[in-house]
Image (cartoon, coloured by chain):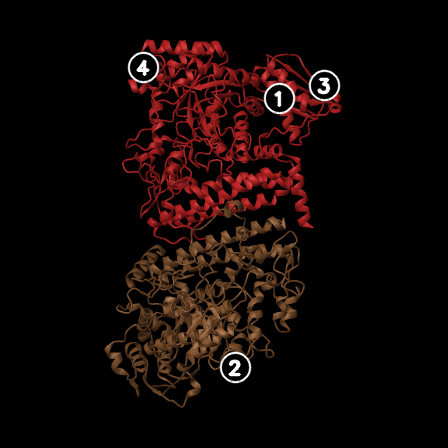
Chain colours: A red, B brown
Amino acid sequence: MIRHLFLLISLFSGLLYAEDGSRLWLRYTAVDDHTARQRTINLQHSDAITQLAKKELDSYWRGPSVSMHVDRKAAHLKEGYQIKAEKGRIEICAAAPVGLLYGAYHLLRLQHTGADVHSLNVEEIPSYDIRMLNHWDNLDRTVERGYAGYSLWRWNELPGKLSPRYEQYARANASIGINATVLNNVNASPEILTLDYILKVKALADIFRKYGIRVYLSANFSSPKVLGGLVDADPMRKEVKDWWKNKVNEIYRHIPDFGGFLVKANSEGQPGPQDYGRTHADGANMLADALRPHGGTVMWRAFVYNPTQEDRAKQAFQEFVPLDGDFRDNVIIQIKNGPIDFQPREPFTPLFGAMRRTPQMVEFQITQEYLGFSNHLVYLAPLFKETLDADTYCSGAGSTVARVTDGSIWRQKKTAIAAVANIGEDRNWTGHDFAQANWYAYGRLAWNHQLSASAIAEEWIMQTFTDSSGFVKPVRQMMMDSREAAVNYMMPLGLHHIFAFNHHYGPEPWGDIQGGRPDWMPWYYHNADTAGIGFDRTTNGSNAVSQYNEPLRSVFNDRQTCPENLLLWFHHVPWDHQMKNGRTLWAELCNRYDLGVQTVREFQKVWDRLEPFVDKSRFEHVQSKLKIQTKDAVWWRDACLLYFQTFSQLPIPYELERPIHELEALKKIKLDMKHHN
Amino acid sequence: MIRHLFLLISLFSGLLYAEDGSRLWLRYTAVDDHTARQRTINLQHSDAITQLAKKELDSYWRGPSVSMHVDRKAAHLKEGYQIKAEKGRIEICAAAPVGLLYGAYHLLRLQHTGADVHSLNVEEIPSYDIRMLNHWDNLDRTVERGYAGYSLWRWNELPGKLSPRYEQYARANASIGINATVLNNVNASPEILTLDYILKVKALADIFRKYGIRVYLSANFSSPKVLGGLVDADPMRKEVKDWWKNKVNEIYRHIPDFGGFLVKANSEGQPGPQDYGRTHADGANMLADALRPHGGTVMWRAFVYNPTQEDRAKQAFQEFVPLDGDFRDNVIIQIKNGPIDFQPREPFTPLFGAMRRTPQMVEFQITQEYLGFSNHLVYLAPLFKETLDADTYCSGAGSTVARVTDGSIWRQKKTAIAAVANIGEDRNWTGHDFAQANWYAYGRLAWNHQLSASAIAEEWIMQTFTDSSGFVKPVRQMMMDSREAAVNYMMPLGLHHIFAFNHHYGPEPWGDIQGGRPDWMPWYYHNADTAGIGFDRTTNGSNAVSQYNEPLRSVFNDRQTCPENLLLWFHHVPWDHQMKNGRTLWAELCNRYDLGVQTVREFQKVWDRLEPFVDKSRFEHVQSKLKIQTKDAVWWRDACLLYFQTFSQLPIPYELERPIHELEALKKIKLDMKHHN
């Protein structure tokens, strides 16, 4: 009986969809003629964006009649909207056409998450002006840290041939409020600024415009030298300034709503103003001056560090804080959420809130460079929220990173947020079906950083899979638990950057390369020895704690008050240190690694139970990925515990599942993985 | 504190031994002069065997004075002995010198298992006259189904150079009562019967004699043709008979206590009497006649089957039962414990007890051809006991296989038992330290088939590792559980022979070879289809049940009464068949496979806890093997459940740990393993 039910359900699911995940969370079904006749979609404007909003509602809206209008006086809404539903009618009001489009998607989201749409009084104002994706896509279509196939951008076909996926991409972004995209890698090829490429970029911009999305480019600081034939790219040289002005003017001739530049300068080998004895401000301001007449913006990255004696975690702060006040107001300093590099868990970067006269923005990483690529199910909204909600105390309690960057503490001309995309040409866009949720969640938080990770997960699940509570509840719980699970099986208690060299997929806490940069070596970060483990960043150590405002400085500095999930980030802790639960550090470390493994095993059970709710294709896809994740979690646990045990000389607590690998065998694993596809 | 204890113990263990497992269970420590002066070892005979017995006691015995004497009238003791200890003196009495040697080892065993040796009244009479190891060693020193290195026998060095391991081997065997060894593979090279090799064999026999061990050889039935240049090897041809007589006489000239021949004939491509239209009896009797004047014996193997329509499990019975009464009395039919081939679990071979006028003996396999090679910890005494204690009902209830073969139901001129050795030139003899226990347990059961598997395990552990109860109890339990664990993760509920082709290491239930013999294909044995799984050997199927005596025939024939651990051996059972515990067959199968995995995971925990009791070398050796076993158990579970699921179309019960492998990936695994080393 159960067997036949199982067969039947499998068969049924198989017939329903030839499912490849390509529809993302946009699974609206077209309304029939009868429904369409029951209601009207009215508008007062006929611009392309408003027309698009009408078209989406015409095609998919099953609720009461809708009328949309732009009210230029409602400027406080920015790109937001108001929705009022009463007496069988719905009104969407916005200050700009794109607000109507976002309002339309709001209605469709309500419809597809089963909300009541007959009585609404909504006002939505976006948290950030610029809600941006960063694509680390190279011009040869490889994607740095990309795990979902080659780049979406078929440069060799552009501008002549336009893939239908360009518009699908724009629509998906618009549906969650993303309005900006940097098309190329921050490790930028100068070639992107040639006319050839500008025309290709224009073709994409022309498609995206209708969806309210502006295009940005990563600029290589040496471009004037490489493309313009100048003797150098010194930002104080007039010819260099002129070259940039002319180049910017050329871009705007073709792309009048061009957004601006993202720049990685003097970082990991990239050229920059320091090559000529100039400051980051000198470089950024030169570009800002060129962009200013057109309303363009410079995102200048703070991800800079050098192989010096200084703690890498301190360097961005040290380089940028002295420049506070030196930047033009159309420059925003783009700061990674943590001071090292997108680790499973980091404290927030202390630079947030440390520059009162300089606009700042957060850079997250959606692509899972340090979180199992597109093999591991790791829902990132809790990580994003952890940073956004972190209190910097820069202007008293409540000075969260979100408020430091959204203009509510210090006014910014424009506010922004960015994240490195996880999108490629895979049919399901993101490699792992659940990685779509990270794209979705980032967009939703960029729109409204007050949303809860759990609420976002729930609406994503309902739109992407089904609104059956038998599915939604366990999947939401799995997603909510997944980031902590990854932290546990990879690097619990504040451990960081003990990844395999270069590709960053598996564990390599023993990693060492003769003559390599210390700050690229795992031992630099874990510092395991017979006494204990962890990076001493206290006042007795690198003193990175001093970059945080009180009370954080003191809280982090004291081993007894430091949050245990960051303990080994800030402290070198003896193996027998007693944790709050009474366990020794060593025992707790073992328990955390094991908990990570057991949690992923539970995910497998959760998912397998849900087979009747999911189409066969996505069910098996996710099932298969979870198998890999479990194997990898065991690999991580065994590698880290067996390696750290060579220092602790202590047994793994005997109640825990035992390792199945040999340390020496694990050390020999060298995966042939690129750091791009 | 715990940490320091751990360090200290590790260090201490490390210093105590440079341990390589080579000392087996023979870890006697030499007595000091003072102790030696306290007691005397007296004897009345000065033959080599008795001298050896004295030497062992002189060197290692710490108890009261011992006097030993042979009493030729005590013939009922056979090779056994009596030990009486009272008033501070011990007497060992035996009917032959070897009985004194066995008695000496008995005392040493008591001493090293902490028994009271001051009050003893022991009478030990061996269950079988011939207690034999079969080495499947080839003359090129590979070992068929050997997993402990190359053959012990260094044929190229013999007879000139004698490895010290020959005597160590003999001593180990004598210490557990083994008195016979077949030096070469049953797939025999004729070359073993050349004079060159006879002289090499003589060199070994000369060493073994002092330990009461007689040498036997596997004979190739074609030898007269290959070595003697005769036209054929027809056993009715006078020249053939004469060749064998002369050859046997030649052997006895060099080895006066030569034991006889083991013959695999007309089986798996080996030559035999059927090549000339003769019967097994014709062939065996010819050899028996040649051996008779010297007191030699023929072990004629019943392991015969042909790729016919007939159920392979029935063929030995069909071929041999009609020959009952036709064999000479110095022929013993050597019968594998189960009707197929040393599977993790089989019912006993129905040929046992089916030939009232023909001596029979059991052949076990100590080497783990079908039980994870020397990688898996599987204690085999429970398997041996299961066969020995199985009731054939051939002469009423209580006609166990043990009693059918030990002469207590029907008189045999000589009784015997054999097992395929797991010994090679690895320093620890058997590859896995715990595989030593299987050699040990076989010897102890050959001596006394009434011993319990648990008691044997306990005495082996105490002699091999330590007598600390903190170690003995958990290890004994682990050993006792280990065979059932292997059955569970490999082939529970009567499944059999779904091993990877040829090497038999991992799972290959899907195995199929175009044009291959059906009876070498897994599907021949499991018969999985959408209706169910199992081999129908009932009266509606192959009718193999008819070869068993009542009440077994009826018990096995009825799905409701058939023991569930043999269910799929005898029945093709629907997936939704309700088991005694209420689960469906499919759910029970899943639970069994999972139980196998979880049990091995528990073994890892048990062993790791015992680190303080064991030298570092053996601790890590076994720890490492258990890791492999756990990985293999998961591999087996996933392979079998995912494959059988393609037929059952049922979910694996959701409370169970999920597979981590993909079926298609598992199907691609082709291990480069030989079936010999």
Report helix, strand or loop for mark 2.
loop
Name the amino acid, label 4: Asp
Name the amino acid, label 3: Thr
Q: Earlier in the sequence, mark 3 or mark 4?
A: 3
Q: Residue at x 68, y 44 (%)?
A: A8
Residue A491 location, x and y as percent? 42, 41
Gap between marks 4 and 1 measured at Cα? 46 Å
Q: Earlier in the sequence, mark 3 or mark 1?
A: 3
Asked whether disc 3 touches disc 1, contact meaning CB atoms under 8 Å apart, the reply is: no
Vertical side of B493 occupied by A659: above or below: above
Residue B408 got which mark?
2
Residue A272 location, x and y as percent? 34, 20
Report helix, strand or loop for mark 4.
loop
Vertical side of B19 occupied by A12: above or below: above
Q: Nearer the viewer, residue A85 or B222?
A: B222
The residue labelled by disc 1 is A103
Q: Nearer the viewer, residue A358 or B651?
A: B651
Disc 4: CA contacts within 10 A as few (<14), some (14-19) or many (>=20): many
Between tags 1 and 2, which lies in front? 2
Between tags 3 and 2, which lies in front? 2
Q: Residue at x 57, y 50 (%)?
A: B643
Name the amino acid, label 2: Ser
The residue labelled by disc 4 is A234
Tell me the subunit letter for badge 1: A
Q: Earlier in the sequence, mark 4 or mark 1?
A: 1
Gap between marks 3 and 2 measured at Cα? 99 Å
Q: Residue furthest left?
A: B33
